Image (cartoon, rainbow, N blue to C red):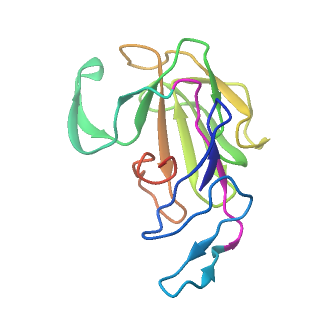
Amino acid sequence: YKYVDPDGRCGTGSHIKGANVSKCTTTLNIEDAKGNSKKPYGEYFPKVVWPTQSKVVNSKFSKGNREIKSLNLNRRHEGIDIRQPLNGTTQSTQDGVVSAVGKASSGENRIRVRNSDGSSSIYRHQEATVSVGDRVSAGQTIGRGDGSGGITGPHLHYEFIPNNETTPVDPLETQLKD
């Protein structure tokens, strides 16, 4: 994936093992073992941006159960927590359409974006500045940190669900991987 961080630096990430990716270009160049150029997803490969000004990850993705003291629960942590001040802006990581806005069952405000490549991004503990049905661009402000739900401090809880999947995967190992 091509992405631009909040400081305007370009980079790439790819979940395609062994791929040779050209940095900061508008096209994705991948070569197979024989040196043949391939475009695994046709001509489209999404631009991806980091969702907050801060790049400090306070809590990582967890496949196994972990204790969540503020909620008195033991469960999976299916996203990453990124440090964010109250009212700090949150940007859409990819182009897409806002598919849900409102309170989650656990009490926090959340925004869900169906990305143009079919994947989904979920932004929790956020007051939405967009509405369901709005088209958003990668890097566009979609919300502000509001401290909603049972949290110990303000942050963005970010989840990424690949196309045709139902369970979140670690965004640091897939979508946001350097």
Q: In which quarter of the image is residue 131?
A: top right
Q: Residue at x 66, y 38 (%)?
A: 92
Residue 97 or residue 31, whichever sits in front: 31
Asked if 84 appears above or below 38 in the picture, the reply is above
How many numbered circles are shown?
0
Does 52 sit left or right of 141 as displayed? left
Does 153 sit left or right of 132 as displayed? left
Does 131 sit left or right of 124 as displayed? right
Spot occupied by residue 129 in the image (x, y as percentages of width and height): 72, 25
Quarter of the image that includes the N terminus: bottom right
Q: Residue at x 50, y 69 (%)?
A: 19
Q: In which quarter of the image is residue 132?
A: top right
Taking the view exactly as shown, the residue that stands out farthest to the bottom is 34
Does 26 sit left or right of 125 as displayed? right
Q: What stretch is highlighted in magenta?
A: 42-54
Q: Which residue is drawn at 57% across and 64% down?
A: 21
Asked if 28 appears above or below 178 in the picture, the reply is below
Spot occupied by residue 167 in the image (x, y as percentages of width and height): 41, 54
Q: Is residue 43 magenta?
A: yes
